[in-house]
Image (cartoon, grey):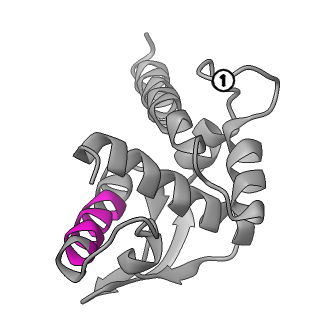
Amino acid sequence: MEDNTEYFNQVAAALFGRLLMDFPKPIDIKPTDLVPKKINGQKEHWEAADLAGHAITWLKRYGYIDFENSLDDKFFDVIISEKGLTALNATPSSIDGKKSAAEQIKEAAKKGALGGVEKLVPDIIKHGTSFAFAAIRAAAGV
Protein backbone atom coordinates (compact mmCIF):
# COMPACT_ATOMS: atom_id res chain seq x y z
CA MET A 1 0.00 0.00 0.00
CA GLU A 2 1.13 3.56 -0.69
CA ASP A 3 2.10 5.83 2.15
CA ASN A 4 -0.72 7.09 4.34
CA THR A 5 -0.87 10.55 2.72
CA GLU A 6 -1.27 9.13 -0.79
CA TYR A 7 -3.87 6.68 0.49
CA PHE A 8 -5.73 9.49 2.31
CA ASN A 9 -5.90 11.42 -0.98
CA GLN A 10 -7.32 8.36 -2.78
CA VAL A 11 -9.93 7.78 -0.06
CA ALA A 12 -10.89 11.47 0.07
CA ALA A 13 -11.27 11.60 -3.73
CA ALA A 14 -13.44 8.45 -3.70
CA LEU A 15 -15.55 9.80 -0.83
CA PHE A 16 -15.99 13.22 -2.44
CA GLY A 17 -16.98 11.49 -5.68
CA ARG A 18 -19.67 9.45 -3.95
CA LEU A 19 -20.96 12.48 -2.03
CA LEU A 20 -21.02 14.73 -5.10
CA MET A 21 -23.01 12.17 -7.09
CA ASP A 22 -25.75 12.22 -4.43
CA PHE A 23 -25.46 15.85 -3.27
CA PRO A 24 -27.37 17.30 -1.46
CA LYS A 25 -28.75 13.97 -0.22
CA PRO A 26 -26.79 12.47 2.70
CA ILE A 27 -25.56 8.90 2.26
CA ASP A 28 -24.48 6.07 4.54
CA ILE A 29 -21.01 4.78 3.83
CA LYS A 30 -18.71 2.01 4.98
CA PRO A 31 -14.95 2.59 4.92
CA THR A 32 -14.61 -0.75 3.10
CA ASP A 33 -16.55 0.84 0.20
CA LEU A 34 -13.65 3.26 -0.30
CA VAL A 35 -10.81 0.70 -0.33
CA PRO A 36 -9.21 0.56 -3.79
CA LYS A 37 -9.73 -2.74 -5.58
CA LYS A 38 -5.98 -3.11 -6.02
CA ILE A 39 -5.58 -3.87 -2.28
CA ASN A 40 -5.00 -7.62 -2.02
CA GLY A 41 -5.15 -9.85 1.00
CA GLN A 42 -7.57 -9.80 3.91
CA LYS A 43 -5.14 -8.21 6.39
CA GLU A 44 -4.20 -5.44 3.95
CA HIS A 45 -7.86 -4.87 3.11
CA TRP A 46 -8.84 -4.39 6.78
CA GLU A 47 -5.82 -2.14 7.43
CA ALA A 48 -6.85 -0.03 4.42
CA ALA A 49 -10.46 0.10 5.65
CA ASP A 50 -9.23 1.22 9.09
CA LEU A 51 -7.23 4.05 7.48
CA ALA A 52 -10.27 4.96 5.36
CA GLY A 53 -12.34 5.27 8.54
CA HIS A 54 -9.72 7.57 10.03
CA ALA A 55 -9.73 9.65 6.82
CA ILE A 56 -13.52 10.07 7.05
CA THR A 57 -13.21 11.12 10.69
CA TRP A 58 -10.42 13.60 9.82
CA LEU A 59 -12.48 15.17 7.03
CA LYS A 60 -15.33 15.68 9.50
CA ARG A 61 -13.09 17.01 12.27
CA TYR A 62 -11.69 19.68 9.96
CA GLY A 63 -15.06 20.60 8.47
CA TYR A 64 -15.00 19.18 4.92
CA ILE A 65 -17.83 16.73 5.52
CA ASP A 66 -20.39 16.08 8.20
CA PHE A 67 -22.21 12.99 9.41
CA GLU A 68 -24.81 12.26 12.06
CA ASN A 69 -23.02 9.38 13.75
CA SER A 70 -21.06 6.23 13.18
CA LEU A 71 -21.47 2.71 14.42
CA ASP A 72 -18.90 -0.04 14.05
CA ASP A 73 -18.00 0.07 10.37
CA LYS A 74 -20.56 2.54 9.02
CA PHE A 75 -20.98 6.32 8.90
CA PHE A 76 -24.56 7.59 8.68
CA ASP A 77 -25.95 10.60 6.80
CA VAL A 78 -22.59 11.70 5.39
CA ILE A 79 -22.74 14.94 3.41
CA ILE A 80 -20.32 17.54 2.07
CA SER A 81 -20.21 20.62 4.31
CA GLU A 82 -20.37 24.21 3.12
CA LYS A 83 -16.59 24.47 3.58
CA GLY A 84 -16.06 21.25 1.63
CA LEU A 85 -18.35 22.33 -1.19
CA THR A 86 -16.67 25.74 -1.43
CA ALA A 87 -13.23 24.11 -1.58
CA LEU A 88 -14.41 21.55 -4.14
CA ASN A 89 -15.90 24.26 -6.34
CA ALA A 90 -12.56 26.07 -6.56
CA THR A 91 -10.49 25.53 -9.70
CA PRO A 92 -7.35 23.74 -8.56
CA SER A 93 -3.90 24.93 -9.56
CA SER A 94 -2.61 21.35 -9.62
CA ILE A 95 -4.33 20.58 -12.90
CA ASP A 96 -4.69 22.33 -16.23
CA GLY A 97 -8.11 23.41 -17.35
CA LYS A 98 -11.03 25.43 -16.14
CA LYS A 99 -13.06 22.73 -14.40
CA SER A 100 -13.49 22.82 -10.65
CA ALA A 101 -12.24 19.96 -8.51
CA ALA A 102 -15.89 18.99 -7.94
CA GLU A 103 -16.56 18.72 -11.68
CA GLN A 104 -13.43 16.65 -12.26
CA ILE A 105 -14.08 14.29 -9.33
CA LYS A 106 -17.75 13.89 -10.23
CA GLU A 107 -16.90 13.06 -13.86
CA ALA A 108 -14.32 10.50 -12.73
CA ALA A 109 -16.77 8.96 -10.24
CA LYS A 110 -19.44 8.61 -12.94
CA LYS A 111 -16.93 6.78 -15.13
CA GLY A 112 -15.78 4.65 -12.19
CA ALA A 113 -12.23 5.85 -12.81
CA LEU A 114 -11.06 7.90 -9.85
CA GLY A 115 -7.39 7.18 -10.52
CA GLY A 116 -5.55 10.46 -10.92
CA VAL A 117 -8.06 12.76 -9.25
CA GLU A 118 -6.54 12.11 -5.83
CA LYS A 119 -3.91 14.71 -6.79
CA LEU A 120 -6.67 17.33 -6.43
CA VAL A 121 -7.17 16.62 -2.71
CA PRO A 122 -4.21 18.69 -1.42
CA ASP A 123 -5.57 21.74 -3.29
CA ILE A 124 -9.06 21.09 -1.91
CA ILE A 125 -7.66 21.00 1.64
CA LYS A 126 -5.58 24.13 0.97
CA HIS A 127 -8.63 26.02 -0.35
CA GLY A 128 -10.70 24.93 2.64
CA THR A 129 -8.01 26.17 5.03
CA SER A 130 -7.69 29.54 3.29
CA PHE A 131 -11.49 29.98 3.42
CA ALA A 132 -11.46 29.19 7.14
CA PHE A 133 -8.72 31.77 7.81
CA ALA A 134 -10.60 34.38 5.77
CA ALA A 135 -13.75 33.73 7.82
CA ILE A 136 -11.78 34.07 11.08
CA ARG A 137 -10.21 37.34 9.90
CA ALA A 138 -13.62 38.68 8.84
CA ALA A 139 -15.18 37.74 12.18
CA ALA A 140 -12.32 39.45 14.02
CA GLY A 141 -12.69 42.57 11.86
CA VAL A 142 -9.15 42.27 10.51
Please provide the residue range marked out in magenta: 45-56
Q: Tell me the residue at 35%/67% (across/down).
A: 39
Q: Amino acid at mark 1?
A: Ile
Where does residue 104 sit, x and y in percent of width and height?
Answer: 73, 43
Quadrant for residue 142, please give it: top left
Magenta segment includes 54 = yes
The correct choice, above or below, for 103 with respect to 74 in the image is above
Q: Quadrant of residue 111?
A: bottom right
Question: Magenta region's main secondary structure?
Answer: helix
Q: Nearer the viewer, residue 87 or 111?
A: 111
In the image, residue 87 lies at what x, y percent?
59, 37
Asked whether residue 39 appears in the rendered view, the answer is yes
Query: For residue 17: magenta?
Result: no
In the picture, measured across the screen, residue 76 lies left or right of residue 120, that is left
Which residue bears the numbered disc 1?
95
Neighbor class of circle 1 (other Cα within 10 Å; few <14, some 14-19, many 20+) is: some
In the rendered image, the residue lying farthest to the right is 98
Check disc 1 and report its element: helix, strand or loop.
loop
Residue occupying the point 24% across, 89% down:
72
Residue at 42%, 65% in the rendered image = 38
Inspect this view and state whether residue 64 appears.
no
Of residues 139 and 112, the one nearer the viewer is 112
